[in-house]
Image (cartoon, grey):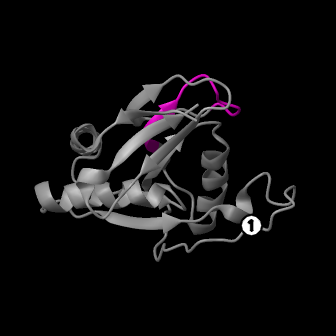
Amino acid sequence: MPKKILLDSKKINLILSRLVYELIENHKDFQDTVLIGLQPRGIYLFNEILKVFKAHHPNIKIKSGILDFTFFRDDFRRSEKTLSANSTKINFTVENKRIVFIDDVLFTGRSIKAAMSAIDSYGRPKSIELLVLIDRRFKREIPIEANYYGTKIDTFKGDKVKVVWDDKPINNKVFIES
């Protein structure tokens, strides 16, 4: 399978900065906003977003958590493969808070649907927004749309979009396999 690099580390860093500025523009002081990284792959983008806030906007206090939605997936009981859960780290209520889910790739929308069901266990949010690095257009199975996205791409059936996060940010990249 040939690989085509969509985003290199330089572009990813620019996108991260832009996404943080968009969040600041819409959420101002983050008084009633909570950032939630979605397990398993969204936590890498989530951590990078938090690093940008800490490095460039240290005066903004961010309330954040990590959500696993494994047992809320619509294919949970349909698979031969046993699904194993990741950790959830939400030690607060989301009642009447503005939630921003953070995930790496938006594809069918099913993961976000499951996350929306899972977050109800922690209260009733005022609103839910979605931030993704990659929005794979035209493949949605559920009507879900990202409020913030790094880039939108069109793919063919069978294409796989992979986001690679490394301990050394210079090695971060996004590529597509056909």
User: Would you place residue 27 above or below residue 93 in this image?
Assistant: above
Q: How far across and how far down the image is residue 98, in percent?
A: 42, 51
Whole-percent x and y of residue 156?
A: 62, 23
Q: Is residue 133 left or right of residue 75?
A: left
Above or below, 23 against 90 in this view is above
110 or 40, nearer to the observer:
40
Residue 152 screen position, x and y as percent = 44, 27
Amino acid found under the numbered disc labelled 1: Leu
Q: Is residue 103 above or below residue 156?
A: below
List the single residue furthest toward the front.
Answer: 1
Task: Give neighbour class at mark 1: few <14, some 14-19, many 20+ (Cα, 10 Å).
Answer: few
In front: 157, or 26? 157
Q: Give the residue pinned by disc 1.
A: 83
Q: Which residue extends farthest bottom?
A: 91
* Residue lying at 29% horizontally and 44% vertically, measured from the top left: 23
- Based on the picture, tell me whether residue 173 belongs to the magenta stretch: no
Residue for point 48% across, 72% down: 90
- Mark 1: secondary structure: loop
Please name the residue shown 21% across and 55% down the image: 52
Quadrant of the snapshot with the C terminus: top right
Q: Is residue 25 left or right of residue 55?
A: right
Q: Nearer the viewer, residue 41 or 27?
A: 41
Q: Which quadrant of the view contains residue 109?
A: top right
| 93 sits left or right of 165 in the view | right
Residue 37, by quadrant, is bottom left
Q: Where the N terminus falls, by quadrant?
A: top right
x and y percentages locating residue 170 in the rendered image: 23, 52
The magenta stretch spans residue 141: yes
* Direction from residue 8 to residue 89 in the image, left or right: right
Q: Which residues are magenta?
A: 130-143
